[in-house]
Amino acid sequence: MKKLVKNGTIVTATDTYFGDILIDDGVIVMIGVELEAQGAEVIDAAGCYVFPGGIDPHTHLDMPFGGTVTIDDFESGTRAAAFGGTTTVIDFCLTSKGAPLQSAVKTWHDKSRGKACIDYSFHLMVAELNDDVLFELPQIIDEEGITSLKVFMAYKNVFQADDDTLYKTLLLAKEQGALVMVHAENGDVIDYLINKALADGKTDPIYHALTRPAVLEGEATGRACNLTELADSQLYVVHVTCAEAAWKIEEARKKGLRIYGETCPQYLLLDVSVLNLPNFEGAKYVWSPPLREKWNQDVLWDLLKNGMLQTIGSDQCSFNFNGQKDLGIHDFSKIPNGGPTIEDRFSLLYSEGVAKGRISLNRFADIIATSSAKLFGLFPQKGTVAIGSDADLVIFDPYAERTISASSHHMKVDYNAFEGMKVTGEPVSVLVRGEYVIRDKQFVGTPGYGHYLPRKRFNQPERLPLKEKSLGGVSG
Ligand SMILES: [Zn+2]
C-alpha cells in the first residue's frame, strides 16, 4: 500500500522545505511538490513539520537493577516512545562476568521479540575482556550487527570494569570498527563516599547526589578521553550531566579525537534541588550520574547547539515510586537509579530547544535522530527523510500545547519526572516503515511489529555509486 504525505514542511538535519513524500513498501520512493499517486492513501500534513523518526540511543527496557526490574518493558516502553515521536530505540544488553555474551544477547532478543512496537537494536555491555570474550566479541559484532560496546566506570562490584578492560575494549573497537560507550564516573571514590555518608547516618535521597560530585564525572570522562587517544580509538560518553565532563569532551574534540557526547532531557531541564523534596519525593529524581546545579544546564545547551555534544538519549530506566523507588526509603544507596523519559524526550527537546530559540529546527533533527543514526551505523536507512530511507516519519504539530503528567502519559511507571511542565508541539501521527504506529494521537501499532536492526560498523566506508539503476540511499 502506497502512502502520500502531502503539504508538510519537511525538516532534516540540513534542510527545511515544503513538499510531499511518497512511500511504497515502507520506503520513501519520491519527494517532490504536488505529487499525485494513484491509489495511495493521503496523509494531510498541512501546518505540520515532517521530521525523521526520533532515534533514542539510550534505553533500559525490562532491565534488572538493584533487586528489581524496570517497570516499562519493550512493549509499554516502545509504545510510549512512539507516542513521543521515537521510531527506533537502542537498548543496553547487560552481560555478567563469566557468562557467554551470546546468552546475554539471546536474553535481550527474548525480552524484545514479539513486544517491540517500533524498530530496535542493542548495545552490548563489556564487563571483562578475557580470552573467551576476546574470541566471542568479534563474532557478535559480525553476526548480530552489534557495533557499540558499553563499559561502566562506576557501580563498583556490580557493573564496573577496570581501566585495563576499558583500554583493551578501545583497542578491540578500533580493530573491529565498533564504538565504545562509557558511563563515566569514578566508581571507586563514589563507593568510598557512599559508605562514609551511610556510616555518618546520612540516608536521604539528596546524599545520592552529594556522594557523586561532578568532579568525579569530569575525572572519569577525562580519563576515558585520554585512554581513547592512547588507543587511537573512538568513544561515546553517555549521559553527560555537567560542565566538568562536557568540557573534557570539548577539549578532546578540539584535539581532533573521535569523541562524542550525549546528554539527556533531565540534565538540561532539572537540577539537584529536587532531590531535597519532602516525603521521599526526591527519590523520583535519582539518576546516575545525578542531577547537577542549575548553571550546568546553560553549558550543556551551548555545547549541544555548537555540536560539541551530538545526541540526546532518554536513559529511560523507569521504576515505580511506590514499590520500587521506596526500596531505598531508609538508605539512598538502595534507591533504584533511573527515571521515565522515553516518551517526552522528543517533545521536551523541541519545546525547550526549538520553541525557546536555543537550537535551530535542523539542529533539532540532527540531535534527535540523524547524529545517532550516523554514530550507530543506521544511516541512511534511519535518521533522515530521503529517497531510499525507511519511511520513519513524525507528523508534528508545532502549535499544539499540552501539560506533561503521569495521569496522561503512556508509560506504565506511576510518576512523571516532568509532571506539570507545559510543552509546545506534539506528534500527531508517527509512521514506522510506512505503517502508522500513532494515528491522530491514538496508538494503532502492534507489539511485535518492531524489527531488530543489525548495524553497520563505525565509520564503515561509504559505498561507491551504483552503475545500474537502483533505489539509492539504503545501505547494503
Ligand atoms: Zn543508562
Image (spheres, grey):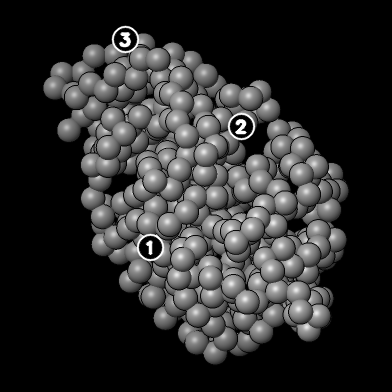
Q: Residues within 10 Å of mark 1 (few under 14, many from 20)?
A: many
Q: Which mark is residue 460?
A: none
Lower sequence index among marks 3 and 2: 3
**3 vs 1, front mark:** 1
Q: Which mark is residue 73?
A: 1
Q: Position of residue 150 (x, y in %)?
A: 61, 67
Left or right: 58 in relation to 443: right
Q: Position of residue 53 (x, y in %)?
A: 43, 38
Asked whether disc 3 touches disc 1, contact meaning CB atoms under 8 Å apart, the reply is no
Which one is in front, 279 or 71?
279
Q: Residue at x 40, y 61 (%)?
A: 72
Which one is in front, 357 or 227?
357
- Residue at numbered disc 2: 352
Q: Residue at x 71, y 33 (%)?
A: 305
| The N terminus lies in quadrant | top left
Marks 3/2: CA distance? 33 Å
Asked whether disc 3 touches disc 2, contact meaning CB atoms under 8 Å apart, the reply is no
Inspect the image, locate mark 3, and give the three-letter code of the amino acid beneath it. Answer: Glu
Inspect the image, locate mark 1, and give the three-letter code of the amino acid beneath it. Answer: Asp
Inspect the image, locate mark 2, and give the three-letter code of the amino acid beneath it. Answer: Glu
- Residue at numbered disc 3: 34
